[in-house]
Amino acid sequence: MASFRRLFTLPSSLLRANISSITGIREGLGGNFRSYNAFASTEQTVLKLDEVDGLVLDGEVARIRGEFEAAKQGFLRIPETVKGMPKMNPEGIYVNKNLRLENIQVYGFDYDYTLAHYSPNLHRLIYDLAKEHMVNEFRYPETCLKFRYDQTFPIRGLHYDKKNGCLLKLDFFGSIEPDGCYFGRRKLSRKEIEQIYGTRHIGHDQARGLVGLMDFFCFSEACLLADVVQHFVDAKLEFDATYIYEDVDRAIQHVHRSGLVHRGILSDPYRYLVKNGQVLRFLTMLREKGKKIFLLTNSPYNFVDGGMCFMLEDSLGYRDSWRELFDVVIAKANKPEFYTSEHPFRYYDMENDTLAFNKVDAFLPNKIYYHGSLKSFLQITKWNGPEVIYFGDHLFSDLRGPSRAGWRTAAIIHELENEICIQNDDNYRFEQKMD
Ligand SMILES: Nc1nc2c(ncn2[C@@H]2O[C@H](COP(=O)(O)O)[C@@H](O)[C@H]2O)c(=O)[nH]1
Ligand SMILES: [Mg+2]
């Protein structure tokens, strides 16, 4: 209805006339117009107006009808123009720089949220594990166990303000979005935002107290931060927003570093992992075209192996064959430091779950390597920056670091699919047209 209203820019006099007339008719004619919708049935309303003696003068009715017809014609013209605008493919690949794929000889992939995709159940798992850790290890009140992950709450790219305890959505220029400031689970009004921050713009000093929650894994953290703040607010207890951040962050780190989350995912892969047959088709096609392929992930090997076997089990011949798709597999790479450090690679012994001590000066097929650095990677592979493209989801770990190294990058932006669907929707397009 909102879009219809916007599109249908009736002159205010007409609107006023209609609304008051409808009221009059309702009162006067009892139930005749009970199901009236002020906008959907405007024409009907106007047609009836001149039949109601004494309510509106004939001249006024003619004027209203004229204005209505003009507005209606304007409305009818718009779809034709808008219809001509091409719709975008939500599953498409979009470029912001020219890229000749024939010049790309090497394809690199991140693992989590790039090759492997997860259901929202994963956020719930991380949230629950971290919450339990805070209660069991940091002695947060047992009532915190009642917290439930709310998948409608977080989005990517929020900032937590360690000084004030607010979650912020900043725009491109570093200003707080009007609807984008939450204290606990409560959205703050513009006035409240101004009381805390002075203006909507975040200055240098304030920015120092912000921590970015940049990737998909951070959804759980954002929600848990908000819920813990809300807990203290509800309990009318004083709290330090920095300590809340530190506790939540430590709990989240524990969940990842201890491998709790990885074991949780592999214990019930159907619940967490999303199978996608196109991945294998794409990798196979690259191999057939003679491209080199590498996997560079921060995840531990066993976790990646379990996930890849699960995702490709229906299409691959035998269990371990996914590794044959890759020329090089690097796990626990410690991105983004990988791009700037000088760490050597270590050979990972899959059988014994141990790391070898000897120097790595070649990548052998079907072997796994840990840690390392971009510098060693380039020395060993001799792959040139511009002939490499790296696919990833994380702004710093997968996009900024590699770009600085001269690689081409491809960002996996899940949100775009939904954004494009919204932008393709006629309601949205009509609204834009009228603004
Ligand atoms: N220690 C932390 N590990 C984290 C955190 N968030 C995610 N992760 C882990 O990183 C990898 C992501 O790997 P990639 O394939 O996308 O490079 C995955 O194993 C996560 O469990 C964190 O905040 N701290
Ligand atoms: Mg990733």
Image (cartoon, helix red, strand yellow):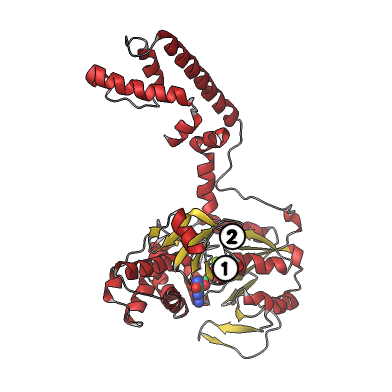
> Up-down: is 37 above or below 184?
above
Q: Is residue 321 visible?
A: no
Task: Tell me the amino acid under the disc marked 2.
Answer: Gly
Mark 1 — residue?
A: 207
In the rendered view, does 233 fall on the left or right side of 261? left
Task: Tell me the amino acid under the disc marked 1.
Answer: Ala
Q: Quadrant of the C terminus?
A: top right
> Up-down: is 343 above or below 399?
below
Q: Quadrant of residue 235?
A: bottom left
In the rendered view, does 11 fall on the left or right side of 39? right
Please report whichever mark, 2 or 1, sits nearer to the chain's N-terminal start. Answer: 2
Given contact means CB atoms under 8 Å apart, are the residues at marks 2 and 1 in contact? yes
Residue 354 location (% of width, % of height):
53, 87
Residue 314 location (% of width, % of height):
47, 60
How far, Cα to Cα, is label 2 from label 1?
A: 9 Å
Q: Is mark 2 within 8 Å of ligand 1?
A: no
Mark 2 — residue?
A: 174
Total numbered badges shown on the rendered structure: 2
Q: Quadrant of the N terminus?
A: top left
Q: Is mark 1 within 8 Å of ligand 1?
A: no
